[in-house]
Amino acid sequence: MNGLLIFDKPPGLTSHDVVSLVRRATGEKSVGHLGTLDPMATGVLPLLLGKWTRLAQFFNAAEKHYTGTIRFGFATDTYDAEGEPAGEAQPLTCTLDQLRELGKRFHGELDQVPPVFSAKKIGGVPAHKLARQGKEVTVKPARITIHGFELTGLVGDTASFTMHVSAGGYVRSVAHELGQLAGCGAHLSALRRVQAGPFTLAEAITREQLIAAVNAGNVETLLPHARTVLPGMPAVTADEGSQNKLRNGMAVNLPEFSDAPLVRIFKDRNELLGIGRRVAGTLIQPFVNLA
């Protein structure tokens, strides 16, 4: 089965758990997710199935949108509610307006230090595995962009927020650093991803919907129309002669599709043959071959 599945991840599952769930449900062994969600987090988790896993490279820069809550009063070693308290509890003395003023620090381009308990690789090993082994972990700062961070309310010691951040950004780190600025510590207490790239919760399916579709034998109906995927790339339909050449890795002449360097090549209305790269004019070389 080839395609894209947009999943609404429930709490308590790792992103790898969701991959395993989809493999068992669909019978497709080749499944990969686009952008890790921590176990406590919920929301949009896009997955590529079958040959479409080769398209993952085109989603690496996808921006993310979140809603969630930050609890003030103490930090944790993981920067979220699943970790152990780090230091003594301190009362929150800031008002919502004061926290919003502190939150202005988290906007635009900045160097962010990812949490030690994260999927960041150190020598090929995820940092969280080294941390859980009690090893000293040094995580290098990464350049990210926070397009928007707004504290929308404060009830007791817990603030609600929305965030729009570039790929590679950690909401947990923002919660932790905001707690440091507030002088009382803080951690991420809840997180929901409402959008990943162009994919939103409105398109996402639940575990129950997936199982129901499997039982009904119509899982394919859950996959978005192929023409809606990677909409920023022009699309052309290849004739039968061009299709045979593309399957063999040969360059072909296809209709003009503007000056875009990459193009989606279709066999028909809903079968994606692959991604082509402009060589010159209308001459297209296969770049990712799904045929």
Image: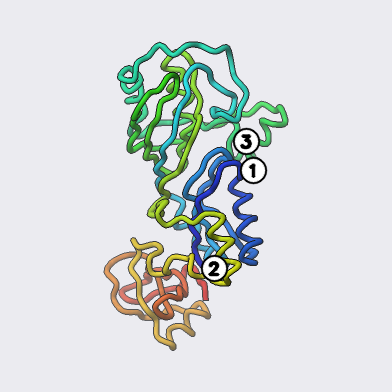
Quadrant occupied by the N terminus: bottom right
* Residue type of the residue flagged with mark 2: Val
Q: CA distance from mark 1 to mark 2?
A: 35 Å
* Residue type of the residue flagged with mark 1: Gly
- Res. 122 image quadrant: top right
* Residue type of the residue flagged with mark 3: Ala
Alpha-carbon neighbours of circle 3 within 10 Å: few (<14), some, or many (≥20)? many
Alpha-carbon neighbours of circle 1 within 10 Å: few (<14), some, or many (≥20)? few
Which of pointers 3 and 1 indicates the residue nearer the eye? 3
Pointer 1: what residue?
124
> x, y (%) of residue 284?
39, 74
Task: Confirm or deny contact between disc 3 and disc 1 (CB under 8 A).
Answer: no
Task: Confirm or deny contact between disc 2 and disc 3 (CB under 8 A).
Answer: no
Kindly state the secondary structure of the residue where label 2 is placed: helix
Q: CA distance from mark 3 to mark 1?
A: 9 Å
Pointer 3: what residue?
127
